[in-house]
Image: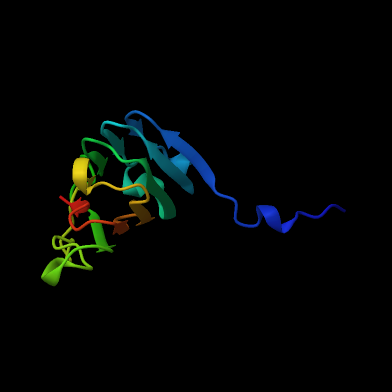
Amino acid sequence: MSKLGRYSADRKKIETLTADKTVEVSDCGTLFILNVATGLTASLPNASDAGNGWWCKFVVRTAPTSPVFIDATAGDGDNIHGVGYCVSGSGADGGNFPDGTNGSGVDRITLHGGATSRIGDQVELVCDGTNWYATALAFNVNGITYD
């Protein structure tokens, strides 16, 4: 009997994105590394196809000069619900995303390029078969928005 060492206990499935991506149901559990100087679009699978417990995460490796979009399918419509947090800012807008979904679904998450984008900005998505639930972390206020 062989043993698996602890080194593989929580090893992630990683895919580097350098161009547009249609995310497949088989991509469940993937950490997508965004390594693109200009923007791209990642299209999620239908929530009903993805099913309960499907998840993925997007992390910025190269800060893009133009936006990165994470889109729900046209058939899903406005079914992305999310919360977020930023670590910079001042006054009233420090420490939050001013346009979080607040109970109303959206069909797009935008990781803004240019001056608001930072290496390490990230969005994690989990599906329940009907809706997508997003948790976003950005360095700058408005670095990631729900549109």
- Residue 128 visible in rendering: no
User: Could you tell me residue 94's position as x and y percent?
Assistant: 19, 67
Residue 36 lies, with reference to residue 9, above or below; the image says above
Horizontal arrangement in the rendering, residue 57 relative to residue 14 (left or right): left
What residue occupies the far right of the structure in this picture? 1
Horizontal arrangement in the rendering, residue 65 relative to residue 34 (left or right): left
**Residue drawn 87% across and 53% down?**
1
User: Could you tell me residue 18's position as x and y percent?
Assistant: 37, 30
User: Could you tell me residue 90's position as x and y percent?
Assistant: 16, 67
**Based on the displayed image, in which of its 4 quarters is residue 83 positioned?**
bottom left
Residue 16 lies, with reference to residue 54, above or below; the image says above
**Residue drawn 76% across and 54% down?**
4
Residue toward you, 90 or 131 = 90
User: Could you tell me residue 32's position as x and y percent?
Assistant: 42, 42
Q: Number of numbered discs present? A: 0
What residue occupies the far top of the structure in this picture? 19
Residue toward you, 114 or 96 = 114
**Residue drawn 60% across and 56% down?**
10
**Residue drawn 55% across and 49% down?**
12
Is the image coloured rainbow, by chain, by secondary structure, or in one colour? rainbow
**Based on the displayed image, in which of its 4 quarters is residue 7 positioned?**
bottom right
**Based on the displayed image, in which of its 4 quarters is residue 43 positioned?**
top left
- Residue 59 visible in rendering: yes
